[in-house]
């Protein structure tokens, strides 16, 4: 909005949540931007904000003639504040992410990874404090089990399309994908609601009823 200060990624990480942004997207008519997935924070880092660097995975039933080719290309082409998004279609056939990829991605400035499948090396990724949200763990390597078949393309996670470069917010409540077309408006709206909720909390702590707080502020 004109006259408003720019809301940067560090500010979003500090102040906004997936729930606040989801509410803002609801008001803009984007009511299905949270994948229906139970993503867990395996490394203890409970929030991840950045721009999607997408990888599309497929299960395999034959030996891979070019092992790890596209996943390595995706990691090596990461930019600062990217979030690697591994779309496996919910497959936990193997672990598609672990310590070595986390180390390489972090060297490129990558902020973390989201996997709608399995990961491994959890203790070592935890020691790195590398943000990793995934459905499950699996001891198996992805070699000859799963491979990346495309990168930097729109992918689907839990019924939600995530395009390259779109802003994603993941925390203990879930994941939200913010479409480019409404990114600025959604973030500004979420920022305003965060401040409104601070005022509501103050009123509630002073003894205002929930009904009175809603009447005063028009939201809860």
Image (cartoon, helix red, strand yellow):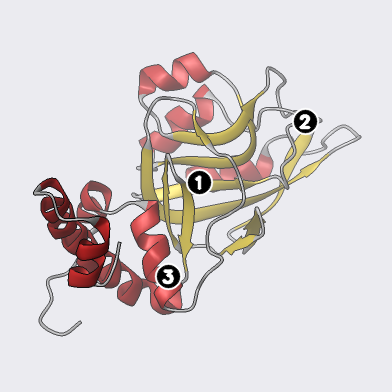
Residue hosting label 2: 93
For residue 23, which quarter of the picture?
A: bottom left
| Mark positioned earlier in the residue sequence (3 or 2) | 3
* Nearest to the observer: residue 164 or residue 7: 7
Residue hosting label 3: 25
User: Label 1: how many residues lie within 10 Å, few (<14), some (14-19) or many (20+)?
Assistant: many
- Asked if the residue at tag 2 contacts the one at tag 3, i.e. Cβ–Cβ closer than 8 Å, the answer is no
Q: Residue at x 26, y 72 (%)?
A: 218
Q: Secondary structure at mark 1?
A: strand
- Residue 152 placement (x, y as % from top left): 58, 59
- Quadrant where the C terminus sits is bottom left
For residue 151, which quarter of the picture?
A: bottom right
For residue 129, which quarter of the picture?
A: top left
Q: Residue at x 65, y 33 (%)?
A: 96
User: Label 2: how many residues lie within 10 Å, few (<14), some (14-19) or many (20+)?
Assistant: some
Q: Residue at x 73, y 32 (%)?
A: 92
């Amino acid at each position: 909005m004109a006259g408003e200060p720019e809301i940067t990624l560090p500010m979003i990480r500090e102040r906004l949540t997936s729930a606040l942004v989801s509410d803002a997207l609801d008001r803009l008519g984007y009511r299905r931007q949270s994948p229906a997935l139970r993503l867990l924070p395996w490394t203890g880092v409970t929030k991840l904000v950045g721009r999607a660097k997408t990888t599309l995975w497929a299960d395999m039933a034959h030996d891979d003639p070019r092992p790890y080719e596209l996943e390595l290309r995706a990691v090596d082409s990461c930019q600062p504040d990217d979030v690697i998004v591994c779309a496996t279609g919910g497959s936990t056939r193997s672990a598609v992410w672990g310590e070595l990829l986390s180390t390489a991605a972090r060297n490129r400035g990558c902020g973390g990874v989201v996997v709608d499948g399995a990961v491994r090396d959890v203790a070592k990724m935890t020691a790195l404090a590398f943000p990793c949200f995934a459905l499950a763990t699996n001891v198996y390597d992805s070699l000859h089990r799963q491979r990346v078949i495309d990168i930097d393309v729109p992918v689907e996670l839990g019924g939600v399309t995530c395009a390259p470069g779109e802003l994603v917010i993941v925390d203990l409540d879930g994941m939200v994908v913010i479409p480019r077309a409404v990114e600025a408006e959604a973030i500004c709206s979420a920022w305003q609601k965060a401040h409104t909720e601070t005022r509501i909390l103050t009123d509630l702590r002073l003894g205002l009823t929930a009904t009175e707080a809603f009447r005063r502020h028009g939201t809860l």
